[in-house]
Amino acid sequence: MPVFKGYLKIIRANLGVVISYTVIFLIISVMITMAMPKSRKESFRLTKQNVTVVDEDESTLSRALIRFLKTTNTVTESAMNRTELSRKLYARSTEYILRIPSGFGAHFADGSVKLAVTKVPGSSAGYYLDACISQFTRTASAFIRSGYTEEEAAKRTLAASDVSTNVKIADMGKISEENRTNYAYLFGYFPFLYLSLMICSISYVMIAFSDREIRRRMAAAPVSSTWQTIQAVAAFALLFLVFWLASLLLPLTVKGRGFYTDPLAGYYVLNTFTLLIDSVAIGFLVGTLVHSLEAISALANIIGLGMCFLCGVFVPMDLLGKGVRSAAQFLPVYWYEITNNLLAENTALSSADRSSVFWSAGIQMAYALAVVAVTLFAAKKMRREA
Amino acid sequence: MSEIIKISNLVKRYGDLVALDHLNLSVREGEIFGLLGPNGSGKTTAINCVLSLLKYDRGDISVFGKPMTPSSYDSKREIGVVFQNVAVFSQMSVYENIDYFCSLYVQDRALRKQYVDEAIEFTGLFDCRKKRPPQLSGGLLRRLNIACGIAHHPKLIFMDEPTVAVDPQSRFHILDGIRQMNRRGSTIVYTSHYMEEVEQICSRIAILDRGKCIALGTADELKGMIRTGETITIEGIVLDEEALSRIRSFENVFSVDYRDQVLTLKCSTGGNLTAILHTLESDGITFGRVFSEKPTLNDVFLEITGKNLRD
């Protein structure tokens, strides 16, 4: 198999580029993966606003209002003067200053004594606390107008605000385990690695062997062109296999062996297989059309990065415009990402999910066939013109 | 000697252009056969047809007594080719290149190693066997091109202008190597438009022009075909019409060319120089340098076609 060995030698000569691409990919993807929140649970944090209250009224209703605010905020009662409080607000050690003037409780029903508020203009905390105070005054006012005493109205208003219930969020197989998302992120970036490396490796070999003088020397040798083609295909198949299996070891870097026991691992493997087939087909097309080694590296980056940006590898798909998403549907990476996102969000697949996975795989395979057909047509045309 | 290549009535057209026009040639076993002709005369096309790298329109080609087709692998196994342009992989080292092309012919690993080592020694590439082609000079690259074509010990070697753009030292090395290969038993078909090279190493020469063989034979036989026996050139001479007429009347002189104080005389036989110089001295005509040259293959080509080989 001399031709087979020749192909491998050329591939080996390009190993430096392959290794550098892989190392860069690994460093970037692992860094991004580590920087991501470990689970969606951890991405929610309870926050409380710092509120300063100056209670000059000391009435039942003013105390009730303070208690009401304390249920959702950190309330500090203060006797500071206006200047000191303004400084506190300026330093953002408080976000809202509420002064309850004397007579607030006594004149609550007619509303003649207004609450004095100092806040950061336009701040969300300000709007939120305005809404809270408004809720309290409207509720208490309703109770008083209904004939309740101040004490009863205060008690009932506080009770009404304390309506809580235990809520259970239905899982429905959706991912929430912290250990699931790590390699989903990693697999999300595979298109860049696959496209860049396959374009570089395959084009590099094809350009070497498609040199006119080399082809003449090969044609003069006692090896039939069919046998030469078979050996070339075998070399590319070996490249495919080695690269594919090696890429499936990459999840070890972010999650140890966890990936290999994942019930969805098979779907991830299928998805990478179809994407790699597409990358190989694109590599063949580039190798057929381009004859300059210098142009290959640039093209690999343009195609790899271009497809990745268009198809939501680096930017979440939800953030892409409708037009971009429509255009991206004509690219295999889009369908790869659709499947990858589906797998990342689920612990088990429903039959509809499985259909979606196989549909995406089918589209990717069809894309590969189309690219191969274009490549063969282009190669034939170029041979004729030569 | 048996015929190792026989080309009969070969016609190859590129559209309206007739590259080979009913070419007839035969190459004998053990000879260095020269194909001489200007650029575009059909030398490379003829070789490509013999190697079945090109389809031809008419004619027959047999190599080693068998018709040559693209699938004549037994014949191809015994053929080595050194193409005009360097055909090596820039990604492989010198050793790997020779080994790769040799492996297309020789499967046995031990034998192949021996052959590759021999080819490296033969072409003087030992010191740069680990280098890659982009690191080699033009001359060394040509030697590598030759090593890749001959490493498998072929019986028949085609060398298509192997010394184009090569420095004199490498050229000498290459020509010496061709003689050695021939002594080792290889038949060599050597194409060039450098007539001195062809004359120097080839036992028989075919001169091609416009796809036809216009002359065939040894160098002496070819020179014997033309009228010129000697060319005398006298520089720095001032002649009037009367003196020129006297020179024209010399017995063996059939062509007189005088321009820019340089006199060129074509004589049908040799040994005319003394008589001419004696006449000039007796007429009191002074002159500078004097050359007397035997006819070259360029003279042969010039007389047959009316143009120079390098036109």
Image (cartoon, helix red, strand yellow):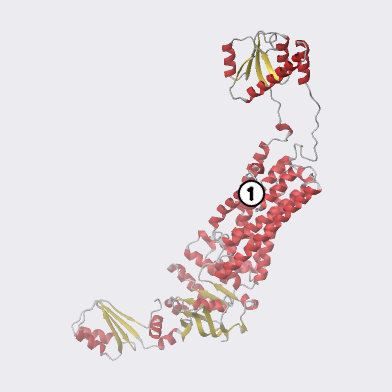
* Residue B218 visible here: yes
Q: Which residue is mark 1?
A: A192
**Left or right of residue A363, residue B234 in this image:** left
Q: Residue at x 55, y 68 (%)?
A: A213
In this view of the protein, which residue sits in the foreground, B8 or A141?
Answer: A141
Horizontal side, residue B299 vs residue A355: left or right? left
Closer to the camera, A319 or A174? A319
Residue B212: x and y in percent read: 48, 84
Residue B216 x %, y % = 47, 86
Q: Is residue A241 visible?
A: no
Secondary structure under the numbered disc 1 in the rendered image: helix
Amino acid type shown at disc 1 = Phe
Q: Quadrant of the N terminus of chain A?
A: bottom right
Measured as percent of width and height from the top left, residue B261 is found at 24, 77
| A111 up-or-down from B168: above or below | above
Vertical comparison of B300 with B172: above or below: below
Q: Residue at x 25, y 84 (%)?
A: B277
Label 1 lies in what chain? A
Q: Residue A77 appears at what percent x and percent y? A: 67, 12
